[in-house]
Amino acid sequence: MLIRNKQEIQSWIERLPRPLVKALSNPFFVSAIVGVGIWWLLAGRVIEFLPSPFAVAKAFLEAITTGEFYFDMAITLRRVIIVAVGTWLLSTVLGIAMAGYWPVETAINPLVFIGLAIPAPLSIFFAMLIFGLGEKTILIALFVVVTPYVAVIIYGGAKSRDKRLVEMAAAYRFSRWQRLREITLPELAPSLISGARFAFAMGWKLVVLFELLSSNVGIGERLQFFFVFNQPARVIGWTLTFTVIMVFVERYVFARLEKKLLAWRPKEDLGRGTAQLA
Amino acid sequence: MGVVSSDHFIDIEDVFFSYPESNVPALEGATLSVKHSEFACILGPSGCGKSTLLNILSGLFVPTRGRVTFDGDLIYNDGQMVSDKLPRIGYVFQDDRLLPWRSVRRNIELALKSAGIPKPKWDELVKHFLGMCGIAQYADAWPGNLSGGQRKRAAIARAMAIDPSSLLMDEPFSTLDEVNARFLRKELLDLWMKTKQTILFVTHSVREAVYLADTIYIMTQGPGKILERLTIDVPRPRAYEDPRLTEVEGDIISSVLHHWGYYEPDSNQG
């Protein structure tokens, strides 16, 4: 069948099943399909040891149907959450204090920048030397590595605050609590969300690395095990499970939170003077 | 302590102010008085210390020298805050300074809360003042989705809603187009006629000052002090085209040219 014009394309599309049209018009779905296609072409042909998408899918399904996987996942996830929440809270306090009080800034700034410069493996090696193997070591090493990054993000946001609103709050005699709740926190919301995202993503990456180096349980330890026993499909399959969790957290936690907290930002296409109800 | 005339609401005597990071004073011996229910304008060129004066009156800055009295209570005396009886003041800034992440209603409620006005009254006050300023339908809108004029009205509603003893206004209409600004000036005068709150209005526009004020204080170029006090006797309601206002405007402009660092072109030639 020859397609001669736009209308014909339109009618041809209309004859396809609705769910298929919907899927094909979703850029995420299309890029995933293209990516898996390229992977399938490369696997075993161009890159000899790269398992095919089917082998990985099999390993993925096998993982999520075994109890062992959930045991390791729970341990790793718990560590990621402790690190993400803990470093985020610590960084929020540090970032706000550094931006607001110059003595704190003077005292903490060099530590933060030294922290940024320390290579991640160095902190786990030293933590292992000092505290031995175990969860405490992993958590301490993670706090040392992740906190400076998140603190810098929040410090940057807190540093560029709008002084005019602070003056308004003073002129209208806002209480300390009102200033924090109504001005400081909403103003910092974008950097607090970026900081949380970063803490979570970096926490996950490094938990796996540190587990691989120093733990006898957790996803990282499993990846190390599969790697040593030459099971690349399982390495990727198990990694994929966490990728699914990360995407889920991004879409259903961070993206929603961001939408809710930053709903006040004017929509460019609405134009000024078009009042939107809050 | 100086004897303060009983009909004066604000008395500023020989006030000096310097910003900590600057060695040039912003105010150098400013003296002025505003009567109860008066509409007073401070007229001056950019950088003459007009806004600094309002910031002192609103409690943001403490003057380095001089005395400030509100309703007979001495508040500042020679670099010291001597009384915490600073009255409740509504401040309309040059920019609206609404919290963009709170609805218009919430912005006003926050000011009401800080002013200690009981919660059961908030709803009525918000409705009343937004209605008075003609934006009742935008109570639940985000400020960022309103026009500049609508935001300005919301800021005025916030300043008036707290039942202030006086309103300080810092060039509130300077960023608006002239038609919008004229409309809002008229509305402001209507509101003032109803509430009779004492208003201290800062502007660099001579036309705006003569249209609005009972009394105009003309400031020198910075460091600021008062050059002249002028009473505008033209009865209200006034029209912009009123020849009496145009005449006063012309007189002011020709008298301040030299003091504000300008010279009449003709006098320099030949």
Image: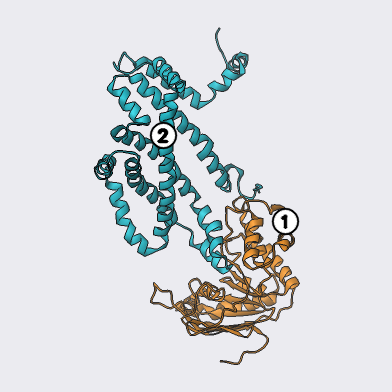
- Give SS at disc 2: helix
Q: Is residue B130 left or right of residue B265?
A: right
Q: What residue is drawn where x is 40% and y is 43%?
A: A83
Q: What residue is drawn where x is 41% and y is 34%?
A: A75
Q: Which quadrant of the figure has residue A211?
A: top left
Of all chains in the rendering, the one displayed in cyan is A
Q: Identify the hue of chain B.
A: orange
Q: Which residue is mark 2?
A: A75
Q: Amino acid at mark 2?
A: Ile
Q: Which residue is mark 1?
A: B136
A46 over B167 or under it: above or below: above
Q: Are marks 1 and 2 on the same chain?
A: no
Which mark, residue A46?
Answer: none
Regarding residue B269, the answer to whether it shows in the image is no
Q: Is residue B191 left or right of residue B99?
A: right
Query: In the image shown, does B198 or B229 lie closer to the viewer?
Result: B198
Q: Is residue B18 left or right of residue B10?
A: left
B139 over A217 or under it: above or below: below
Q: Which quadrant of the figure has residue A133?
A: top left
The percent coordinates of residue B231 (x first, y second) are 65, 82
Q: Amino acid at mark 1?
A: Ala
Query: In the image shown, does A76 or A202 lie closer to the viewer?
Result: A76
Whether label 1 touches label 2, CB < 8 Å: no
Image quarter where the C terminus of chain B lies is bottom left
Q: What residue is drawn where x is 43% and y is 57%?
A: A96
Q: What residue is drawn where x is 72% and y is 53%?
A: B137
Q: Chain of mark 2?
A: A
Q: Counting other residues with Cα less than 10 Å from the Cα at mark 2, is it few (<14), some (14-19), or many (20 or more)?
A: some
Q: Counting other residues with Cα less than 10 Å from the Cα at mark 1, is it few (<14), some (14-19), or many (20 or more)?
A: some
Query: In the image shown, does B206 or A85 lie closer to the viewer?
Result: A85
Query: In the image shown, does B79 or A270 lie closer to the viewer?
Result: B79
Q: CA distance from mark 1 to mark 2?
A: 55 Å
